[in-house]
Each structure stands twice: as structure tokens, then as C-alpha cells.
Image (cartoon, helix red, strand yellow):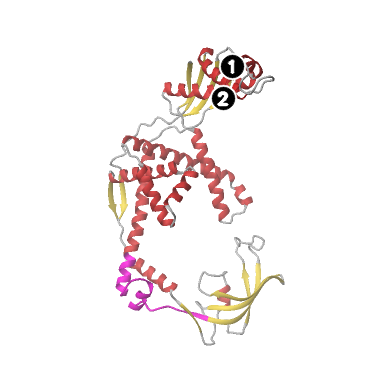
Amino acid sequence: MKRSIQKPDPCKRILEIEIPPQEILSIEEDVYNDIRKIAKMPGFRTGKAPLGMVKKSYQKQAGEELLRRSIPEFYEKAVAEEKLSPIEMPHVYDVNWQWGKPLVFKARFDVEPDIRLKAYKGLKIKKKKNEVKEEEIDKVLKDLQEKNAELRVVEPRPLKKGDFVLCDYKSLLADKVLESKENVWFSLEENTNLSGFADQLLGANVGETKKLNLDLPQDFPDKNLGGKKIEMEVKIKEIKEKKLPVLDDEFAKTVGQFNAISELKEGIKRDLISLKEVGAKKDIEAMAIDLLLEANKFSLPGSMVDRYTANLEHRFRQDLTRKGVKKEEIEKSNDLIKKRAREEAEKQVRIYFILERISQKENITVSDEELDKHIENLAKQLRQDFDKVKKNFSQKRLLEELRLELREEKVMSFLLQNAQIEKVE
């Protein structure tokens, strides 16, 4: 077998391979013998026809099968001899072959980048101190107080801010009714309604019908109404006011396993510290990644970037759709989506290869036992059977992807353990 290799760019290779006829004779014999077993020839039972007759009658089919078997075999052999590491299936082209002649073809594919890792131990990272301020604890207490508030019917009196009102209403645009509903509750707390709605209802009494004039915002959900002036007729039927519980020991007992308000505050403080630790860990991991990206510049395999880009574009469009963005609006942002997806894809591919090289250099792996342990924990969280969850991962071909995620987590832990982390205010 003859071969030559071209390097159009740092991550792309083109192998030109030539196989002499004598090197594919054994494959040719196997092909014809396999065809003979199922060949149907007049006057002969299946599998009993003379080989010479089979060759004459099935030459075209045999040639196609010979190429199907030969090209992958000699491609793999050439790749091994050249010590290449393709990251994708090759694009095979310029195939040239006839019976008794050499088989010639080209295979184009991407390979892993040549990375000379810069120092990744001792990364200098600044970490914020995880201090919890009293006002943060007070805010959580206030939120708990709000969540446990009661709504109580009040004696007849004028509406005031913070009230909840039961009413019938209809909205009109140029005397045309847009919407009409009965027994709807509205909150007159600030920033919970259309601008001007609460203010115009203040002072109204039960049984009274108020006429409101409202300016709808330009970004109103119904695009046809955005920026328009509408009228509303609101009939007040009932008023309730919010009664906040007292922040005392009894309150602490109702919101958790606490005997006193002081214990509740300590519990809140612990939770806030834990949340900040999670956030801080993400921050320092991001800093570590940024330092690695800045220090390690190398060419990327185009096919891998293209694949990541396509997946990210699809995900970005799905996210926008879930957020209620209309298809036409998404299409208008098509160029921006493509640009953002490409940039993110290049970053993700670069991170993947950097972490992979570190894992190889430091011999960081994920054993089958570790993988099973992780799946077992997932199964417990999902309250499902371990075998069922593992089978699901296997059927979706996600086991190795999960192993890769766990390996990257271990690499990140290694990097942070060996980093110089300075705590700052």
C-alpha cells in the first residue's frame, strides 16, 4: 500500500491511498465466496453454482461490495501507520478502481489539535469572601413573612395601596369591548399592575364602579395594542388586606424545625453561606477556565466547531421559543444567533481539548465504578431503579458523555486544588 499525506491546515489531513491489486485479492475472494452462498443461478441449487459463473453474473455487485470492504480497511491501516487521531468519519472521494487495477482514493478528515499546554498548576485566582450581611438575612425573613401572610376581609372602607380587590371589569378601545371578566382578584401592591391602574383605583369603595384611562406600554404582549390608550370599567365587589405574621418564636416554629427566631436567623445565614459557596465555586471555575483559554491558543478542528455550532443554534432557538418569542422575530435575529453560537462553540471546543489534555497528563479518569455510583445517586434523586436509569443512558448513547462530564469535573477539582486562591473583599 502506498500513501501520501497532505496538511491543508493544522487540524485537517488528506490521505491519498493506493492499494495494488494483489493486496485486495483476499478481499475479492471473500466477496465472491459470500455471494456464491446466496447466488441463484439457473440449473443450480442456491450456493452450488460454479465460482466462475458467479463471477460473470455478479461482477457489478461484487465490485461494489469489494469497495465497501476495502476502503475502510485500508483507511484504518493507513491512519494507524501514520499515527493519526481522526475525530470524525472521513470524507472519501476521488475513488478510482477497475478489476485488476490498483485501488486509489482520498480521505479527508480532521484530527485533534497539537496543544502544548501552558502552566495550569498554580493558577492565580481571586475569590470573594462569603460574608452574609444582616440586611440579607432580613430580606429572607421579609420574604418568608410575605409568603405566610393572610388575606383578611376588611370592614367597608376606601381602597388603599397594598389591598387586594375582587372585581368585575371590562376593557374598551374606542368603545369596543376588548375583554370582560367577573370575580377577578387584583393586587394594588406597587409594580404589580399596568402603570396607573392602582393609583386610579385608590379611594374607591365596595359597590362603586370606577372608570380608568390607561396607556398600554409599547412592549404589551398583544402587539396590536402596544402603545394604545384604553379604558377600563372596574366594579369593586370585595376588599381584603394583607396581614403579616409577627416575626417571633411562634413564627419560627411555623416555617421550619426551629424553636426560636434566633435559630431561624442562624438557619437562614447557613443557607445563604451555602448558596454563596456554590456561586463562588462557579465564579472561580470560570476564572480558571478564562486563564487557561488566555494562555492556550491553538487551531481548532472545523468539523467539530461546526457540529457544536449547529447544536447551539438549535438550543438558542428553542430557548427563545420557550420564552414566547415569535418565529418571525427569531428569524430576524438569525445572523446574531449564528454569530453567538459560533463564538460559544469555539470556546467550548477549546475548553474540551484543554481539559482533555490535562486529564491525560495527570492521568485523571472516571472508572466504571465511579460512573455507576453517579448514576445510582441520580436514580435516588429521581426515585427510580438504578438499572432503569442506566439502561436509559445506554439506549440514548449518553454513558460516555456522562463519563466525560464527570472527568471534566474531576479535572476542575484538580485545577482548583492546585490553584493559588486569594480571598478578597
248 part of magenta stretch: yes
Which amino acid type is marked by label 2?
A: Arg
Would you place residue 11 above or below residue 341 in this image? above
The total of numbered circles placed on residues is 2
Which amino acid type is marked by label 1?
A: Trp
Mark 2, secondary structure of its residue = helix
Q: Residue at x 54, y 81 (%)?
A: 239
Residue 189 at x, y = what percent?
Answer: 50, 73
Q: Residue at x 58, y 43 (%)?
A: 335
Q: Residue at x 41, y 42 (%)?
A: 404
Q: Which is more foreground, mark 1 or mark 2?
A: 2
The magenta segment: 240-269
Which is nearer the eye, 80 or 279?
80
- Tell which circle, 1 or 2, labels the residue nearer the N-terminal end: 2
Residue 415 at x, y = what percent?
Answer: 31, 43
Mark 1, secondary structure of its residue = loop
8 part of magenta stretch: no
Q: Determine which residue is flagged by label 1.
A: 97
